[in-house]
Structure formats: structure tokens, C-alpha cells
Image (tube, rainbow, N blue to C red):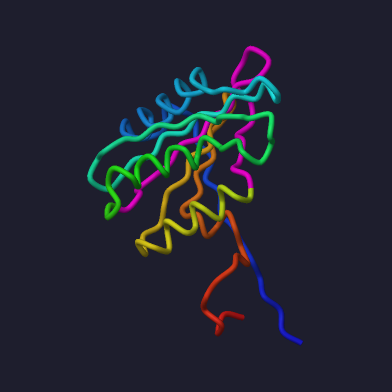
């Protein structure tokens, strides 16, 4: 028998402890919650993606009565960035959630589909994506999408 240890380190920050560039990214993600279309869940999510070249792309969740047809804020922002700069790596993403007239006190993590999408972008460019999850009490920072999705699907058959 073998064992595999899977460990994720999450750095916890207050907003004022973050670099100005990341403060802007989080602020943009929070602003994007206002552009969300969430009449069913009433859970408004905003995302902001920062590319290595400094370009910033925004997204918000867009729901649909045909549930699978909706799209999360993270994938909106990633798709927008990729359509404008298909060869530019993503440096960082910030995600914020707003419900019941206030921002979430605890950071909200991406769904599984978004985690896989982030990982796909990360692997495509062979460059880690810093992930910032906003909460009013504190902000989580995860150093890469791979850390959010351990044991993800991989084409590498030698992975054990």
C-alpha cells in the first residue's frame, strides 16, 4: 500500500495587507456582483482576472431557467480574457459573492467546473494562477488552481 498526502496551504489576509494591485482586483470583483443576473439563486458572484500583461477582465454569474445553461462569474471572466488575449497567461483571479444585501463574510470558493476551468488555463500556460477569495472578515489566497483541485483529471498517465 502507498499513501498520497494532499495538502493545500491557504494564506489568510485582511484587505489592507494585500498589494495595491490585488486590492484593485478584489474591488473590481466586488463591483461585478452588481452585474450578475441571479433571479433564481439570488447569489451574485463577481470575478476579476488579471493577465500577466496587466490587462484586467471582469465577469459575473449569469443564470438561466434551464439550469445548466447558466455560467459562473469565473468562467465568464476567463472566457472574456481568453477571447481578447488567447496567448497571455492569467496571473491572478479574485472572486466575491453578494447575497441577502451584503457581501459574504466568509470567502466563497469556486464550483468544481470553475476549478477545472482554472486548472485548464493554468496547465495550458504552465503558469500558476493566484486565487483570491474575498470575504468581509478575511481573504483567502491560494497559490494555484492545482491546489484547489487535487487529484484533477490529467492526461499524464504516469501520475500516481
Give 142 or 70, whichever is nearer the viewer.
Answer: 70
Residue at (59, 43) in percent of width and height: 110
Residue 138: image quadrant is: top right
Where residue 17 appears, as percent x and y from the top left, is: 42, 32
**Horizontal arrangement in the rendering, residue 66 relative to residue 123 (left or right):** right
49 to 24, vertically: above or below: below
Residue at (38, 29) in percent of width and height: 23
Give 16 or 159, whichever is nearer the viewer.
Answer: 159
Residue 150: image quadrant is: bottom right
Residue at (47, 45) in percent of width and height: 131
Residue at (60, 34) in percent of width and height: 107
Quarter holding the C terminus is bottom right
Where residue 35 appears, as percent x and y from the top left, is: 49, 20
Residue 48: image quadrant is: top left
Q: Is residue 32 magenta?
A: no
85 to 121, vertically: above or below: above
**Number of marks in the rendered image:** 0
**Horizontal arrangement in the rendering, residue 17 relative to residue 155 (left or right):** left
Farthest bottom residue in view:
1
Where residue 51 appears, as percent x and y from the top left, is: 31, 45
26 to 147, vertically: above or below: above
Farthest front residue in view:
66
Quarter holding the N terminus is bottom right
**Horizontal arrangement in the rendering, residue 25 relative to residue 74 (left or right):** left
Farthest top residue in view:
101
Where residue 112 appears, as percent x and y from the top left, is: 63, 50
Please report the bounds of the magenta region as a residue range.
89-111
Amino acid at each position: 500500500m502507498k499513501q498520497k498526502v494532499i495538502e493545500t496551504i491557504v494564506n489568510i489576509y485582511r484587505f489592507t495587507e494585500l498589494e495595491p494591485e490585488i486590492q484593485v482586483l478584489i474591488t473590481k470583483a466586488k463591483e461585478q456582483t452588481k452585474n450578475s443576473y441571479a433571479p433564481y439563486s439570488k447569489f451574485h458572484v463577481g470575478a476579476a482576472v488579471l493577465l500577466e500583461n496587466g490587462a484586467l477582465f471582469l465577469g459575473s454569474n449569469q443564470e438561466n431557467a434551464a439550469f445548466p445553461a447558466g455560467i459562473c462569474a469565473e468562467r465568464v471572466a476567463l472566457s472574456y480574457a481568453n477571447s481578447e488575449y488567447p496567448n497571455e497567461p492569467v496571473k491572478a483571479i479574485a472572486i466575491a459573492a453578494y447575497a441577502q444585501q451584503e457581501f459574504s463574510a466568509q470567502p466563497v470558493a469556486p464550483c468544481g467546473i470553475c476549478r477545472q476551468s482554472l486548472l485548464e488555463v493554468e496547465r495550458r500556460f504552465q503558469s500558476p494562477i493566484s486565487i483570491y477569495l474575498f470575504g468581509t472578515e478575511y481573504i483567502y489566497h491560494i497559490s494555484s488552481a492545482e491546489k484547489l483541485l487535487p487529484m484533477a483529471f490529467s492526461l499524464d498517465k504516469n501520475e500516481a
